[in-house]
Image (cartoon, grey):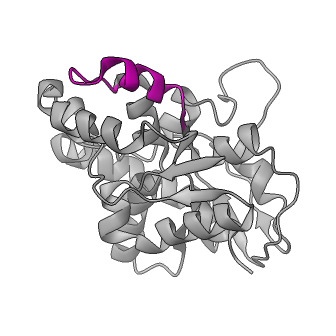
Amino acid sequence: MTVGLFIPCYVDQFYPQAGIATLQLLERLGVDVVYPPKQTCCGQPMANSGFSHLTQDCDDLITESFAEFDYVVVPSGSCALHIKDHLHSDKHPDDARHLRTKVYELVEFLTDILKVKDLKARFPHKVGVHQSCHGLRGLHLSQMSELVAPPFSKPEQLLNMVEGIELIPLSRVDECCGFGGTFCVAEEAVSAKMGKDRVADHISHGAEYITGADLSCLMHMEGILRRQKSNVKVMHIAEILNSL
């Protein structure tokens, strides 16, 4: 298979190491990966702010850049879900509809398509797993805690393959971090308080690192950790799965 790698703009600008880890991990697993150089934002910030009509250029560019690949892999739950649910193109409507069926967030690609059963990775640290809302409720990467149903977690399934890692328990396993994209701008005080609560849960259980499949959430919590002068670090799940 040939995979097109979509790197969200905030990963490209602030956390390039996560994009590099995603590429290296996929290549280690035998995947032929191509990075289309003209790619840009998925359009989610405009759409979430009520300006979906301004995303057409983004949608056209994504469609033209990624239509040829067998799959498109995105190391971000929110961006992956946005493309899956909202990608449309007046120029290439059929290509856009088909492309939406081929987009996968990294974790679901590893578990559902590659069906990874073994990883050569080592990360001897105590790690808390943050279940982002888009990944949890949109992509169903984990079971929602309010449901009376068997629990599962695709991120934890992969992390449990990593040698030396200790996944810590949390009091509230899938509570929102408060980032919410433009919500953190429109409702700054509420967003910050939610983030502080989320960080405190990880810290109280002894986390050395907080990981997840959405760097937007991790970025929000990292800002809080830095202001608190905490030694706890955030790290995208691709970096841990790619650790040797």
Q: Residue 35 lies in what quarter of the image?
A: bottom left
Q: Residue 124 lies in what quarter of the image?
A: bottom right
Residue 79 left/right relative to 184: right
Residue 209 left/right relative to 35: right
Vertical position of residue 204 compared to residue 192: above or below: below
Residue drawn 66% across the image and 46% down it: 1
Residue 122 x, y percent position in the rendering: 79, 76
Does the image show residue 185?
yes
Q: Between residues 102 and 225, which one lies in front from this camera angle?
A: 102
Residue drawn 18% across the image and 30% down it: 56
Q: Between residues 34 and 110, which one lies in front from this camera angle?
A: 34
Does the image show residue 203?
no
In the image, residue 88 lies in the stretch drawn in magenta? yes
Residue 11 left/right relative to 49: right
Range shown magenta: 87-103
Vertical position of residue 211 compared to residue 182: above or below: below
Q: Between residues 149 and 35, which one lies in front from this camera angle?
A: 35
Residue 37 x, y percent position in the rendering: 33, 60
